[in-house]
Image (cartoon, rainbow, N blue to C red):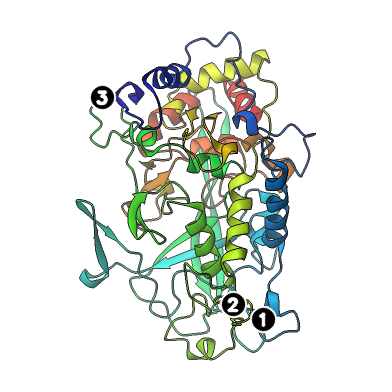
Amino acid sequence: MVFAQDAVVRSDLSVEDLARVQAVTRPTTDFSKAEGSEKRSAGKGTTQFAVNADSFSHFLDNLSFEQEEQFKLGNALFRKIWVSSPSSTQASDGLGPLFNARGCQSCHIKDGRGHPPFEGQAENVSMFLRLSVPPGADDKRLAMDGVIAGEVGDPTYGAQLQDFAVPGLKAEGRMVVDYADLLVTLRDGTAVTLRSPSYSVADLNYGPLADDVMISPRVANPMIGLGLVEQIPAEDILAHTDPEDRDGDGISGRANFTVEPVSNSVMLGRFGWKAGMATIRSQSASAFAGDIGISTPLFDLPHGDCTENQPECLAMPTGEQARLGVSEAPDPVLDLVTFYSQTLGVPERRDVDDPAVLRGKAAFYGAGCASCHVPKFVTSRNAENPAHRFQLIWPYSDFLLHDMGEGLADHRPEGLADGYEWRTPPLWGIGLTKLVSGHTFFLHDGRARSLTEAILWHGGEAQAARDGFADMSQTTRDDLIAFLESL
């Protein structure tokens, strides 16, 4: 990948500051020691509390006292358990009627990574199935000089399978995951067994799915550092695009674009597994509607994902009450949940000077992993929140779409992303997954049970990096994993 920051013109920077940003974000070639400030993944906002299960739940270290209050109020709403209507707790009315979760924290457990159903687990709590059918001519909207195809939900079951329902209503159905073992032998003879999943739906209660329905499994993403990601200038992300692979390195990152509902304008997508959302506010409102069945000022959907082919669902009462606001989660609620999501910090890195970690970092760069998992950016000088302003951050992502090969393909487009493309997920905090989330399941559907398995699933544009890892000695692979676990 060509690191093209030198060609970027940022309107928020002076010539001198632009030169500083270009210098500090240029990839290192010295792996003998840690880079300056490498330990502080979120710049001045990096959290420095004791490492424990709450490591993802602290606010940015550079928030003001007044902002800490906003964060705590948002945290309470993020943890809030919504109830079906009508109820005595009217401020919590509006759940569903069909839903995947009763609150934000139900999926983003401890603000961390979701997981597929554990063995023997009857219910799924932090993973769901997206549903869509190919869009027709009437379902497309023009954007810039191309066409962004809107996702068209299944005519009966909508945009995602809802596996829970309020009393008096049947859930839509049940996600079924079957795994087949896939044996991979590395160059040194080490055998690794991967899980190859297949997905289906059982116990459908509202008739069949469409014949051409496309299904895509998704686990909840970690919440840390989102506000800083939102403040990476679009120019800096776009500088890493190379859709025609002109430099011939096999990496051809593409940007996704989406229509942002507040401004009704086309914006760069940077959130979600396929970069289908441009802002945290729209991402939050979409999750309220799709996951919990709660309406907001952005998405006036008091019946959530119910469709016209589910009249029983549409006949259920909603939680909209004029005295509390126009929607079930009016602006004050959406504002606070958005603020909370924007101001969750990133834990300080560990062991950055450890020799094994430094060797692993060198192996990470040498294998080409940093071509997509771009280590660092500097946020905008014009960020609305001073805590986000002009920070050197280390997310290890380019936030672009990459073809990851047949093995990871869901064959379901989302915006400009095709069925083989996924957004590069940030790696910061990944080494704390076991401690925070209680598991080590990775990738969009949690199929990988370890970081090693996650790497070995890489294909497409990442095939060369994956093969480089598979060809390493056991010691070098261990060092690379030690580096990842330090993030």
Residue 393 seen by the camera:
no
Q: Mark 3 = which residue?
A: 247
Secondary element at image label 2: loop
Q: Disc 3 or disc 1, which is closer to the eye?
A: 1
Give the CA distance from mark 3 to mark 2: 49 Å
Residue 253 seen by the camera:
yes
Quadrant housing the C terminus: top right
Q: Mark 2 = which residue?
A: 96
Nearest to the observer: residue 2 or residue 189? 2
Amino acid on which disc 3 is placed: Asp
Badges 1 and 2: C-beta atoms under 8 Å apart?
Answer: yes
Nearest to N terminus: mark 1 or mark 2: 1
Residue occupying image coordinates x 54% and y 26%:
189
Looking at the image, residue 218 sits to the left or right of residue 247; the answer is right
Q: Residues within 10 Å of mark 1 (few under 14, many from 20)?
A: many
Quadrant housing the N terminus: top left
Q: Mark 1 = which residue?
A: 84
Q: Residues within 10 Å of mark 3 (few under 14, many from 20)?
A: few
Quadrant assignment, res 354: top right
Amino acid on which disc 1 is placed: Ser
Q: Residues within 10 Å of mark 2 (few under 14, many from 20)?
A: many
Secondary element at image label 3: loop
Give the CA distance from mark 3 to mark 1: 55 Å
Nearest to N terminus: mark 3 or mark 2: 2
Q: Position of residue 171 (x, y in %)?
A: 58, 80
Q: Disc 3 or disc 2, which is closer to the eye?
A: 2
Nearest to the observer: residue 454 or residue 72? 72
Nearest to N terminus: mark 3 or mark 1: 1
